[in-house]
Image (spheres, helix red, strand yellow):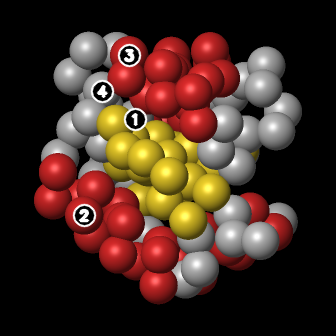
Amino acid sequence: MSPSILIVDDHASFRRFARRSLEQAGFEVVGEAADGTTALTETRRLSPDVVLLDVLLPDVSGLDVARELAPCPSTKVVLTSSRGAEELGVALDEAEADGFIPKSELSGASLIRLLAA
């Protein structure tokens, strides 16, 4: 069975790119969200295997969303950002997430590698 994924990003163009890339790699995109509040609602409603979560959202930090999702061990949270890990620094190190992929490096293969680690 294909891993299900919820894509959370405030930019529709990135959500379209991520959807195409991840579906081509065999992921089942079960939903999208443009902000943190919707991400929490949709995660609870859809119970995806993976939440691809932008760090910088318009209403609440993706780091805060990840913290709220942390008690749900059946859902992996993978952070993403147009900023590199070095720019996010300690906040990324302390994030309650299963990993980080810069947006410029996102692909189905990179997500599969991260999840397998």
The image shows a total of numbered marks equal to 4
Disc 1 or 4, which lies upstream in sequence?
4
Task: Please indicate, yes or no, whether residue 87 appears anywhere in the rendered image.
Answer: no
Of the two numbered discs 1 and 2 in the rendering, the one whose residue sits closer to the viewer: 2
Q: Which residue is mark 4?
A: 35
Q: Which residue is mark 2?
A: 16
Disc 1 or 3, which lies upstream in sequence?
3
Q: Is residue 109 above or below residue 41?
A: below
Find the distance from the CA under tag 1 to the CA under tag 3.
13 Å
Mark linked to residue 55: 1
Residue at position x 48%, y 29% from top? 42
Amino acid residing under circle 2: Arg
Amino acid residing under circle 1: Val
- Position of 31 with respect to 97 (left or right) is left
- Position of 109 with respect to 34 (left or right) is right
Q: Secondary structure at mark 2?
A: helix
Q: Which residue is mark 3?
A: 37
Amino acid residing under circle 3: Thr
Marks 1 and 4 close (CB-CB < 8 Å):
no
Q: Secondary structure at mark 3?
A: helix
